[in-house]
Every structure is written in C-alpha cells, then in structure tokens.
Amino acid sequence: MILNYVYRIYPDARQEELLLEWLEICRKSYNYSLRELKDYIGSRKCSIDRCSLVSEYIIPADYPFPGYHQQQNNLPKAKKVYPQLKSVPSQVLQTNVRRLHDAWDFFIKRGFGFPRYKKYGQMKSLLFPQFKENPLTGSLRAPAVGQVKLPKLGGVQINLHRPIPEGFVIKQIRILKKAKGWYALTSIQSDMDIPEPVPHGHCIGLDVGLLSYCATSDGFVEPGRKFFKTLYSRLKVLQHRLSKKQKRSKNYEKARKKVEAMHNHIAFVRKNYQFHLAHKLCDMADTIFLEDIDFRIMAKGFLGKHTIDASFGQFRQILKYVGKKRNVFVCEVDHRGSSQTCPNCRIEVRKELKDRLHSCPECLYEVDRDVASAQELCNRGVEMLSTQGLWGKEIGCQVGLSGAFCLDKWRGAAMSLA
C-alpha cells in the first residue's frame, strides 16, 4: 500500500537559493535531452536518398536511439563538460531524464502530446527517489516541527502536521515549488495489502451539477460553489496591476508572483472543500454510484468556465481515493438519459434545462430534478451489480419485469442482500 502525504517545508535562504539553482539546472538538462531526442527523430524523417544540411543534423545510421538508459549513462560524461551538473544529486538528474522518457512513452501510447521544452521557471519539482535511512527527524507520531534530511542540502525544517502511520516507511520525496511556498510530497509504503472495496451496505446515487454541486438519492443536496468567481474580484485587481507593469522588470515579477499566489489559493480552497465533501458522502453510505460523464466535453459548452471552476473530474478522483481508504465502494454507471427517466416507474419524462422539478405523469412521483437523477443512477448501479450475480442472490422484483414498481421496495430488496 502506497500513500502520498504532503508537508510544508521551510528552507532557509541558502537552501532556497540552492533549490532554485537545481531546478534551473534540471530544466536545462531536460531541454538538452529533449533536443537530442528531436535531432535523432529529425534525422530519420528526411528523404531516403538525401539529408537536409539546414534543418537536420546528419546522424549515422547505426547510431542508437537516445533512450533513457543511454542518456542516463551519458550523465557522468556530461559532468566533465558541464561542471555545474555536479552540484545536483546524481539520482535527481537521473529521475529528471526519466521524466522526459515517461512523457515520450505516453506520447507513443496515445499518439499526441509530444514533449515540449520547459521555459524559465517552468521546472517546479525535484524527485529524491530513495533513502538509505529515514530522512525525517523529530516526532513522527504526533503533529510537530521536525527536519527532513536531503542529499547535498542538509536538514530542512518541515511541518509534520499529520503523523506517519505505524508500519509505513518513506520511499521517496518530491520537493514542489509553489507560489505559497515549498512542499514535500512524501511517498510512504507498507507491506500490508488492503483489499479493494466491494458493494455492501447502504447504496446511494450521486449527481453533480452547477446549480447544486451534488445531490444524492437520499435527498441530500449540496449547494453550488463557485470558487473562482467568489475570489475573482481580488484576482482581477492583481491582474490589472500586473498589466500596468513593464515586462521583465522587478516590479512585474513581484506582481506576477501575487497573481500566481492567488491562483494557488483558489486551487487550495477548491481541493480542501472537495476532500471535506468526499468524507461527508462516505459517512452517508457504503456504496456510491457516480455518473460516467466526460466533463471535458461538458466544459466546452456555454457554461464551460463554471464547469472548469467546479472541477468535477478532480472531485470524482478524490471521492474514489477517499472511498478506497474508508472501504466505500465507488462505481461509475451509465449517465445517458438519467435526468430524463423517472426513478420510480422508469418511463421517459422529457425535461428542459430550466425545469428543476421532476413530475412523472404516469406514477405522479414528484421530487427535485437532481435528486431524481441521483435516484436513477442508484437504480442503474444496483441493477448492474445485482443482475450480474455479483452479490450472490437474485432480486425478487427486478427492473426487467413489466409494470410499475415501488422504488423503496425495490431498493430495500437490493440493500437487504448486503
């Protein structure tokens, strides 16, 4: 089992200057490796009977592809030519090359997204992949201020706001530079194996939206939150001040950092809210059914800015992560037509976007539109699991039978199997 804990670190002036220098060296190393990769590809794209002397280097035909192992083995030779590389820990340079080839492998796999050069200031993290001994000193079992010992950097003050669980060891640490400060993303690992959650207990469906952030099949409705719009007034002032500064001046850089810090604050507020909401939903049920909607398509509509601000995709990932830690089964079900179907009698009830109340003309079932959609998602989730025999028993009144049925009786029959 592997977990990631994020701690705030406070390097002194010398350590911060050294970290910034390492980031710049890693950025140049990354770009150099990418240039070597692009030169090799460019030399293989020319005509079969001639090469361009202007746009491509002439590389021998038997020259091997500059893969990860070759570029990693060339680092000791590069240190003799560029002595500044010696100031960076060797494993940090190796993982920096590994990052480039991970991006290259991802590009080969999906067919788009070729790795790009990193501009000045775009390299934001350093990875220390392994430690001989525990790098944290201080009280690890209670919130305290300790130190994290990093190669060639020494002890850096760290705020251990949450204890390391018993039985976990630190495998690697990634140092992140953000507008709000420096952070240590600590990966901890344990030998214990936690099984994946299985469907059990009380089931709920979850529908997300802009008017109400989420609604459950039990009637709980979370009001809509607009994180970016709420703090946009302050951000607009900072951006206006930035536009008046002369580019590449010291005052411009100060104003740019304030804008970056404001964006960082908005992201922190959003993620903190989503984690609290995920824990609240896990307190309500043991099985949660989500809609499998592609929010990237939803963000291309006329409400795209508000959709991106809500960050439903990130919330879905957080809910799955929290559910796995708390033994709550989280599953995605088909979302098509969920808002146009009556959850009680399952007939189609067409509604416009402005219609916020579900009223079925067949069974006279009336409920909030978002709650009705969540109930239909719960119906589909229970139907998907129960009809395939995943719970080991059959349901007395399944959906496939003709005629209307009572939602409470049907759900009660399904939940009694847990």
Image: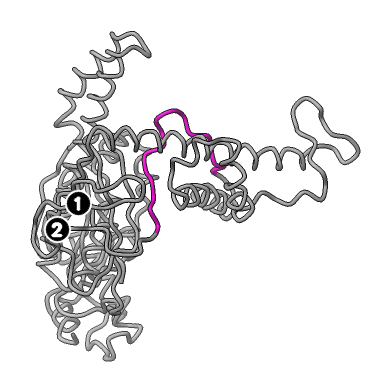
The residue drawn where x is 17% and y is 43% is 211
* Residue 125, image x, y percentages: 37, 43
| Marks 1 & 2, CB-CB < 8 Å contact | yes
Crowding at dot 2, Cα within 10 Å, few <14 / some 14-19 / many 20+, comes out as some
Residue 114 belongs to the span the image colors magenta: yes
Residue in the picture at 23% in, 40% down: 11
> The magenta stretch spans which residues?
113-129
Above/below status of 197 relative to 363: below
Task: Tell me the distance, in whole angstroms, between the alpha carbons under discs 1 and 2.
Answer: 7 Å
Q: Quadrant of residue 270?
A: top left
The residue that mark 1 highlights is 147
Quarter of the image that includes the N terminus: bottom left
Main secondary structure type of the part rendered in magenta: loop
Q: In this figure, which residue is indicated by the disc labeled 2? A: 138
Task: Give SS at disc 2.
Answer: loop
* Mark 1: amino acid: Gln
Residue drawn where x is 25% and y is 18% of the image: 255
Q: Is residue 132 visible?
A: yes
Residue 227's spot in the image, x, y percent? Answer: 17, 37
